[in-house]
Amino acid sequence: MRRASRLHETLSQKKRYVLILDNLWEAFPLNEVGIPKPTRENGCKLVLTTRSLEVCRMMDCRAVKVELLTEEEALNLFLSIVDVHQITPEVQGIATKVAKECACLPLQLLLQLKV
């Protein structure tokens, strides 16, 4: 409860924010974890990623289907973001492994770059 209260207080003080909840497996009440309901008035956005359309429905979200990237598209996305001046065979090999491991999911690939 204390953590949810602190989260609610912090988010409520923000004028605008985008909160990304990645890889949801189950629906849950936002207020129970301290997330204020995003509204047009508060200018806040909530992005959920899930493989379950049912979770989207239960969370009262608008579903937007995102197609998987091909391995080539995933690799190109990865290489376009990584600050590499010269693509060596070693870097190319690592990038290819990361793109495959992320199963060509765009958000997962981008999140791996932030780690």
Image: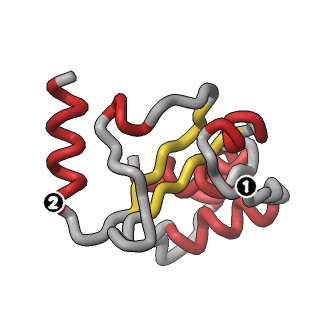
Which residue is the site of mark 1? 63
Answer with left or right where residue 112 lies relative to residue 11.
right
Query: How many numbered marks have been drawn onto this rendered protein structure?
Result: 2
Q: Is residue 47 above or below residue 55?
A: below
Q: Which mark is residue 13?
A: 2
Answer with left or right where residue 32 lies relative to residue 76.
left
Answer with left or right where residue 73 lies relative to residue 14.
right
Q: Residue furthest bottom?
A: 85
Q: Quadrant of residue 17?
A: bottom left
Percent coordinates x, y for residue 102 in the rendering: 66, 43
Q: Is residue 2 above or below residue 96?
A: above
Classify mark 2: helix, strand or loop. helix
Q: Residue at x 77, y 40 (%)?
A: 53
Q: Is residue 25 above or below residue 82?
A: above
Q: Earlier in the sequence, mark 1 or mark 2?
A: 2
Classify mark 1: helix, strand or loop. loop
Give the class, few, some or many, for how many residues have Cα within 10 Å of label 1's Cα (few <14, many ≥20): some
Which one is nearer the viewer's eye here, 71 or 5? Answer: 5
User: What is the three-letter code of the residue carrying label 1?
Assistant: Ala
Give the class, few, some or many, for how many residues have Cα within 10 Å of label 2's Cα (few <14, many ≥20): few
Q: Residue at x 81, y 62 (%)?
A: 72
Q: Residue at x 46, y 52 (%)?
A: 20
User: How did the renderer colour the structure?
Assistant: secondary structure
